[in-house]
């Protein structure tokens, strides 16, 4: 299954990121992957250590710099703002990465991630608890992100729309969601690392139309 096919940016989530970035003209995108949520109309510098993900960047997007969050090849205060989406849980050294991002950024640092506590409230906990536990162990709590960046910081909840176009795990909560349509291995690391045995078919575990939410995090600059 194609990663790009399932991981299509949702315009409503993108708008939240754009608002958090404020008037920034130059933006660093750390763990940029294929370029999801990179804002149009701004000068974006993507950083991505994975060669396979760099190769997935669509034509027309800037080529990604081969570097890691913990060792960014930029001078201090090089960018108006920085962003990272669904990436911090993959960083080898979270504190070093946050320190580096803060060093090279003059203004806000915007992090879109999942709150591990909220993940355990997600309906999939009853359906496939091993998937949620895997995901929850990987995501750092908001407090760790605030502490790592230092200075004033704030958190906001970003609603995941029922018809979300981005195929991350928590987007599959509506009544049309089906285990057969989940992009296992293509866009969901949590499902890819779990036992591939058949999931429960207990209908009580299928989702309802309640507004599930993931946590987005944005730290304002100095």
Image: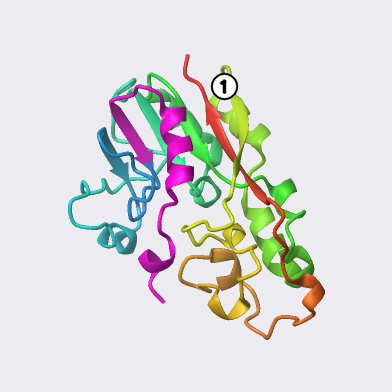
Residue lying at 75% horizontally and 81% vertically, measured from the top left: 200
Left or right, residue 200 beside residue 178: right
Q: Residue at x 74, y 62 (%)?
A: 123
Q: Does 180 appear above or below 24?
A: below
Query: Is 204 situated left or right of 189 in this image?
Result: right
- Which of these two is toward me, 43 or 208? 208
* Rendered position, 86 above or below 25: below
Q: Residue at x 62, y 82 (%)?
A: 196
x%, y% of residue 144?
64, 35
In the displayed structure, 190 sits above or below 70; it is below
Q: Position of residue 28 (x, y in %)?
A: 34, 35
Q: Secondary structure at mark 1?
A: loop
Q: Is residue 54 magenta?
A: no
Q: Quadrant of the N terminus?
A: bottom left
Within 10 Å of disc 1 (Cα), the crowding (few <14, some 14-19, many 20+) is: some
Q: Where in the figure is residue 136, as x and y percent of width and height?
A: 68, 54
Task: Indicate whether 209 appears above or below 37.
Answer: below
Question: In percent of the image, x 18 and y 51: which residue is there?
Answer: 60
Is residue 194 found left or right of 35 in the rendered image?
A: right
Residue 103 image offset from top left, x and y in percent = 41, 24
For this orientation, the residue located farthest to the top is 222
Q: Which residues are magenta?
A: 1-29
Residue bearing mark 1: 150
Is residue 2 inside the magenta stretch?
yes
């Amino acid at each position: 299954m194609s990663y790009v096919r399932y991981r299509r940016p949702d315009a409503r989530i993108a708008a939240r990121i754009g608002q958090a970035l404020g008037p920034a003209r130059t933006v660093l995108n750390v763990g940029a992957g294929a370029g999801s949520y990179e804002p149009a109309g701004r000068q974006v510098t993507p950083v991505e250590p994975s060669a396979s993900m760099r190769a997935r960047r669509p034509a027309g997007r800037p080529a990604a710099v081969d570097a890691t969050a913990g060792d960014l090849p930029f001078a201090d205060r090089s960018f108006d703002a920085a962003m990272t989406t669904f990436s911090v849980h993959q960083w080898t050294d979270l504190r070093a990465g946050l320190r580096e991002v803060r060093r090279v950024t003059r203004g806000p640092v915007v992090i879109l991630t999942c709150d591990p506590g909220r993940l355990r409230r997600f309906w999939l906990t009853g359906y496939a608890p091993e998937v949620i536990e895997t995901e929850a162990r990987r995501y750092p709590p908001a407090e760790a992100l605030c502490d790592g960046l230092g200075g004033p910081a704030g958190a906001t909840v970003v609603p995941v729309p029922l018809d979300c176009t981005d195929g991350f795990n928590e987007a599959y909560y509506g009544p049309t969601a089906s285990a057969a349509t989940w992009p296992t291995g293509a866009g969901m690391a949590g499902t890819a690392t779990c036992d591939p045995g058949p999931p429960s078919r207990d209908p009580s575990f299928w989702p309802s139309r309640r507004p599930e939410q993931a946590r987005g995090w944005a730290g304002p600059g100095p």
